[in-house]
Amino acid sequence: MFTMSAPQPILHEQLATLYSDHFGWLRSWLCKRQRCWHNAEDVAQDTFLKLYGNSVPELTLREPRAYLLTIAKRLLVDRARREKLEVAYLEALHLHYRETHAESPEQAYFMLRLLEQLAEVLESLAEKARQAFLQHYLEGYTHAEIAGNLGVSDRMVRKYLAEALLRISRLEA
Amino acid sequence: MHNAVHSIEEQAANWIVLLTADDPSERNSAAQDYAAWKALDQRHHAAADQIERFLDRTSILQGSNAQAQAGKQALRQVLAGQRHRSRRLDTATGIVAVLFLLISSLLVLQQLHILPFGADITSPKAQMITKTLQDGSKLILGSNSAVKLHFTGTERRIELLHGQLHLTVAKDPTRPLVVETAQGEIRALGTRFMVREQPETTVLEMLESKVAVRLRQTPQTETVINASERLIFSKNRIITREPLDSRGNEAAFMSQRMILDNEPLGNVLVELGRHTSGLLHVNQQAVAELRISGVLPLNDGQSALDMIKATFPQLAVTRHAGGYLTLVQ
């Protein structure tokens, strides 16, 4: 670690320079990928917003394009996930469960935000850890029942759950 | 826990897992140690708080309301899509898998005759199925019956789609068990009973302890049924409430026999048809005035029909299409 300088909060003027040097390039890269000018503009804006107030290693400022692309790609993944969840949730709510009682916009936002974060956490886990989390915290199965369902030891179930909770502790606020 | 090698977040995660351990004494001592650990350092507190608040928000998905169910379904659907993509099932494997699924589901369908969509446990004709459910309750399905299970953190719900079930309920004071039929719901208060779903009516036979019944159209009223009672109800009213020979009826169910006490023959033949392989067609006009008493085997439809034929020589019981179709007229 001693060869690398510690991450520093990005400075306002550094951000301004980054923006003027690379915004057009990032937008056209996203545009080719997205085939939609409007979205590309949004995602490019969001990418620079992410940098604001963040600590970045000194090195990334000298080679910013790779770093910008990493952030932009992650934003694209988040956006696609959010859209899929929204469609799946509303479809399930209105077709399968025939919900007639209207949800308030706040309730819908609260639910979709929760689903988005849950999906992000669970996607990063292996299948068994994912199942353990869903069965325990959503379905209310005990540790022993999950151990039986997954064919693993009780200790392993605890390890899976702790792994999921660790990912939760690292979610961005 | 080895504090030295774990980050604060890892320690917080490990503590919170212990808070919902199966063993109550382990849970209690973990809760005390966890509180002490949080009080040690502001950063401990912050890490724990982030996880706890997230789990708190997650609890809205535990309910049985439409939002919670739809949320869970959306989550599973999106996670499943993500998994398939990352595995990159190649086309050849895909085709083989689809063919295999098609053929096996056709075989299953043929075996089970008609399978109601979405049934979790289904029994074929002339065969009972015994299952121990995940909560330890013992479920016996009569022949040609189907149930759907909806077990959540707050409730154990068994939907009887058709046929008959016998249930020995495992005690769980935090999660009541409910049997639901088209006519209403039966809430178990820890107990053993049988339920039969018929067209327009549900028959409940209490073997031990008691249950509370709510009819579909009058859910605000609850009727408590005690051991050795039989209740027949429709969507909106109680049709019969009578004493029951619980031991005899349970034994009859277990050995797949029907005990009949001056029953209309038309009903008996319909019930028999559900258990007999092939089709049983009854001319209801011909049997309208007839009543029958005795014991009929349900798992051997042919001898049951032979007994009926011997009792009512005026009826013509004829077999067609290699025994597949039986006419009673």
Image (tube, coloured by chain):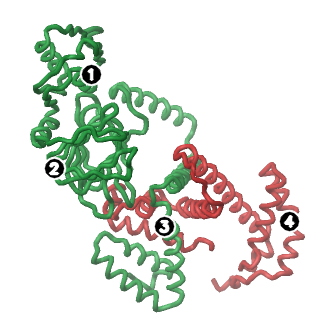
Chain (green):
B
Do the residues marked 3 and 1 share a common chain?
A: no
Q: Of discs 4 and 1, which sits in the foreground?
A: 1
- Amino acid of disc 3: Ala
Give the SS element for disc 3: helix
- Rendered residue at 84%/79% (across/down): A14
Q: Is residue B107 above or below residue A60?
A: above
Q: Amino acid at mark 4?
A: Phe
The answer, for residue A7, to whether it is visible in the render is yes
Badge 3 is on which residue? A164
Amino acid type of the residue that numbered disc 1 sits on in the rendered structure: Ser
Residue at 57%, 36% in the rendered image:
B91
How packed mark 2 is, by other alpha carbons closer than 10 Å (few <14, some 14-19, many 20 or more), is some
Q: Are marks 4 and 1 in contact (CB under 8 Å)?
A: no
Q: Marks 3 and 1: which is nearer the front?
A: 1
Labels 2 and 1 in the same subunit: yes
Q: How many marks?
A: 4
Residue at the location (70% across, 62% down)? A75
Q: Read off the residue under disc 2.
A: B227
x and y percentages locating residue B89 in the rendered image: 55, 42
Q: Give the CA distance from mark 2 to mark 1.
A: 34 Å
Chain A as rendered: colour: red
Side of A24 where B317 appears, left or right: left
In the rendered structure, find residue A23 and report the number of the disc placed on it.
4
- The answer for which chain carries disc 3 is A
